[in-house]
Image: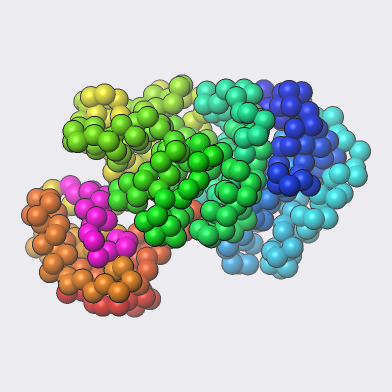
C-alpha cells in the first residue's frame, strides 16, 4: 500500500469536504486535491526525472506535490529553504537531476545551482490543467520520501522513508475518518521536517482540514487559531515559548482548540506549565519521534498532562517531563554501552523497533541491528509504569570526574530560575575533571542575574557535582528553524570567545 492510497481512501470518503485551505473559502477539496495531484503526476512523469525536490514554505503546494510524487512513483525530497545557495546545491546534487518545484522567493537561489526549477504557483496551475495520470504501481518497499537530517553535528544524511514505513505510522496512530467536518489543524512545522510530512498524511487520513502558517509569529498564530476556529495544532517547543511570552501570563481565551501537540526538542518545564494554565480547555500531547522513525513513536496524552499538573505526588508530577508511552506497534529498549538491556529506571541509550522504523540512509544502508532494533542515540530510561524519559543525545553527555551527567537535568533546573529566559548546558575539556560544566544562560528582559547566584540556585536543587563550573550570559542561543538547539555550535562559539551575542562573560 502506497501513501497515494491514503489519499484515495480519503477522497472516496470525504469528496467535496475542504482538505487544504481557509474556512473563508478558496481551498482545495479532497476531490480537487486528488485531481490536481494526478495532474501533477503527469507533469513529473513527462519530465523524465526519477526524483522530485521541493523548496518552499508551508502551503498547499507541498501536500499536492507529496501525493503527485507518490502517484508518479517517484520519491520526494523536501529541502530546507533556509540553506545557502551552496548548501542547496550540495543537497540537490545528491539527488541526481531531480524535478524541482520551488516557491517564487527561492526560485532564483535554486536556479543558481544549475538545475531547472518550476515555481510553485506555475506548477499548481499546470497540475490543475494537466491530464490526470493513473497512479503508478508502487511497491510497498519503494522509497516515498527522502529527508535530510539537520546536520547539526555532521554532514546531513538522506533518511529513506519507504511507503511501508509511512503507511504503518498512519494506520497505527490515527483512526480513519475520526475528525469532525469542522475540525481544522494549523500547521506551523516546515515541509522538510518529518512532522511536516506526517502532519499531511495523518490529518488527511482523519479528514481534518489543514490550514498553513508559512512563517511562524506568536501573535499571528494566536490570531489564526481564533479566526480559523482551529481545533488542532502542532508546534515545536520554541514556538510554544513565544506564545507563552506573547500571552504575558494571561489566559488565551481560546476554548475551541482541543488538541495541541508539541515535540522535536526539549520542552522547558515552566513553559509547559504556563501553557497548560493559558489553555485550560486544550488537551496537550507530547509527541516524541525521529526522522528515522517516520515521526512519532511515543506520546504523552492529555490526561497524563492534566493529572501530572494537578498532582502533588512527585512520582506523577515528573511525568510532565516524560515522552509518554510507545504508540501501538513500537517496542522500546534501554541498553547500556555493551548492548545489555537495562531494567526500568536504569539510564542508557534508547533503541526502538517497529514497522514504521526505517533506520536507513541512502549511500550508507541500514543501521538496524540483526533483530531490527534502531539505535536512536538518545539517552533515557523507562520507568516502572512504562513512561519513557528522554534526557538528551548520548553525544551530549558530560563525563565529569567519571560521573555521567545529562545536560537536560541541569537545564530543567535552570529553566525555573525566575531571572532566566533560556539556557543550555554542555561539557568543556578540563585537565582535572576530564570535563567541566558550562551553562550559557539568557536573562529575562530587565533582569541582571549574577553568575554565583545562578550556580548556588542549581546547587540547592541538585547534587554539587551538577553545579555549573562556568556561567556565560548571552542575549540568545542558536537554534534550528525546528527548535533544535545547536549545542555543538554553541560550545565552539564559547570556546573561541566570539560569535555569541553576549551580555556578560563567564564568571
Choose top left, top right, bottom left or bottom right for residue 249. bottom left
Total numbered labels: 0
Q: Position of residue 387 (x, y in %)?
A: 30, 29
Residue 480 visible in the shown view? yes
Q: Residue at x 77, y 45 (%)?
A: 25
Residue drawn 67% across the image and 56% down it: 56
Specify the segment rendered in magenta.
404-423
Asked if residue 34 lies left or right of residue 431, the reply is right
Q: Give the residue at x 17% y 64%.
A: 454
Residue 188 in the image: above or below residue 13: below
Whether 417 is among the magenta residues is yes
**Is residue 485 toward the left or the right of residue 226 in the image?**
left
Left or right for 462, reference 354: left
| Vertical arrangement, residue 120 with respect to residue 495, above or below | above
- Is residue 287 visible in the rendered image? The answer is no
Judging depth in this view, the residue of 446 and 156 nearest the camera is 446
Residue 114 at what x, y percent from top left? 73, 64
Residue for point 34% across, 34% down: 306
Indicate the quadrant where residue 472 lies: bottom left
Q: Quadrant of residue 489?
A: bottom left
* Residue 425, percent from left and from top: 26, 59
Q: Position of residue 204 (x, y in %)?
A: 66, 33
Q: Which part of the image, by quadrant, shows the C terminus?
A: bottom left
Which colouring convention does the figure follow?
A: rainbow
In the image shown, does 468 or 22 lie closer to the viewer? 22
Q: Quadrant of the N terminus?
A: top right
Residue 428 colored in magenta in the image: no
375, 245: nearer the viewer: 245
Amino acid at each position: 500500500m502506497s501513501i497515494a492510497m491514503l489519499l484515495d481512501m480519503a477522497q472516496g470518503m470525504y469528496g467535496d469536504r475542504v482538505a487544504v485551505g481557509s474556512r473563508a473559502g478558496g481551498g482545495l477539496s479532497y476531490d480537487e486535491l486528488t485531481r490536481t495531484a494526478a495532474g501533477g503526476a503527469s507533469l513529473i512523469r513527462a519530465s523524465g526525472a526519477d526524483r522530485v525536490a521541493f523548496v518552499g514554505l508551508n502551503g498547499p503546494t507541498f501536500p499536492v506535490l507529496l501525493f503527485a510524487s507518490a502517484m508518479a512513483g517517484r520519491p520526494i525530497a523536501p529541502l530546507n529553504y533556509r540553506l545557502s545557495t551552496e548548501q542547496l546545491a550540495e543537497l540537490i546534487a545528491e539527488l541526481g537531476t531531480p524535478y524541482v518545484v520551488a516557491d517564487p522567493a527561492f526560485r532564483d537561489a535554486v536556479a543558481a545551482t544549475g538545475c531547472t526549477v518550476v515555481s510553485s504557483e506555475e506548477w499548481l496551475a499546470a497540475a490543475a490543467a494537466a491530464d490526470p495520470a493513473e497512479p503508478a504501481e508502487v511497491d510497498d518497499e519503494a522509497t516515498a520520501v527522502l529527508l535530510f537530517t539537520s546536520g547539526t553535528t555532521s554532514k546531513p544524511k538522506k533518511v529513506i522513508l519507504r511507503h511501508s514505513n509511512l503507511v504503518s505510522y498512519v494506520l497505527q496512530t490515527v483512526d480513519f475518518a475520526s475528525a469532525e467536518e469542522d475540525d481544522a489543524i494549523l500547521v506551523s512545522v516546515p515541509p522538510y521536517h518529518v512532522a511536516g510530512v506526517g502532519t499531511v498524511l495523518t490529518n488527511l487520513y482523519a479528514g481534518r482540514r489543514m490550514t498553513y502558517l508559512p512563517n511562524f509569529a506568536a501573535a499571528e498564530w494566536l490570531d489564526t487559531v481564533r479566526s480559523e476556529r482551529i481545533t488542532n495544532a502542532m508546534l515545536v517547543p520554541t514556538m510554544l515559548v513565544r506564545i507563552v511570552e506573547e500571552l504575558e501570563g494571561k489566559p488565551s481565551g481560546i476554548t475551541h482548540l482541543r488538541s495541541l501537540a508539541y515535540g522535536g526538542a526539549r520542552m522547558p518545564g515552566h513553559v509547559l506549565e504556563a501553557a497548560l494554565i493559558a489553555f485550560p480547555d486544550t488537551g496537550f500531547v507530547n509527541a516524541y519521534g525521529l526522522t528515522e522513525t517516520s515521526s512519532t513513536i511515543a506520546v504523552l496524552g492529555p490526561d497524563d498532562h492534566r493529572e501530572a499538573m494537578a498532582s502533588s505526588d512527585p512520582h506523577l508530577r515528573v511525568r510532565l517531563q516524560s515522552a509518554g508511552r510507545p504508540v501501538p506497534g513500537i517496542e522500546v529498549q534501554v541498553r547500556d554501552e555493551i548492548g545489555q538491556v537495562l531494567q526500568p529506571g536504569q539510564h542508557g541509550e534508547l533503541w526502538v523497533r517497529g514497522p514504521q522504523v526505517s533506520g536507513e540512509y541512502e549511500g550508507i544502508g541500514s543501521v538496524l541491528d540483526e533483530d531490527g532494533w534502531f539505535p536512536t542515540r538518545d539517552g533515557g530510561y523507562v520507568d516502572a509504569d512504562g513512561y519513557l524519559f528522554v534526557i538528551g543525545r548520548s553525544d551530549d553527555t558530560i563525563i565529569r570526574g567519571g560521573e555521567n551527567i545529562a545536560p537536560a537535568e541541569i537545564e530543567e533546573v535552570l529553566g525555573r530560575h525566575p531571572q532566566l529566559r533560556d539556557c543550555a548546558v554542555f561539557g568543556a575539556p578540563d585537565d582535572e575533571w576530564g570535563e567541566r560544566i558550562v551553562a550559557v544562560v539568557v536573562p529575562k528582559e530587565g533582569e541582571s542575574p549574577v553568575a554565583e547566584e545562578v550556580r548556588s540556585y542549581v546547587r540547592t536543587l541538585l547534587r554539587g557535582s551538577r553545579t555549573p563550573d562556568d556561567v556565560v550570559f548571552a542575549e540568545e542561543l542558536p537554534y534550528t528553524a525546528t527548535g533544535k538547539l545547536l549545542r555543538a555550535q554553541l560550545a565552539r562559539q564559547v570556546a573561541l570567545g566570539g560569535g555569541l551575542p553576549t551580555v556578560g562573560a563567564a564568571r
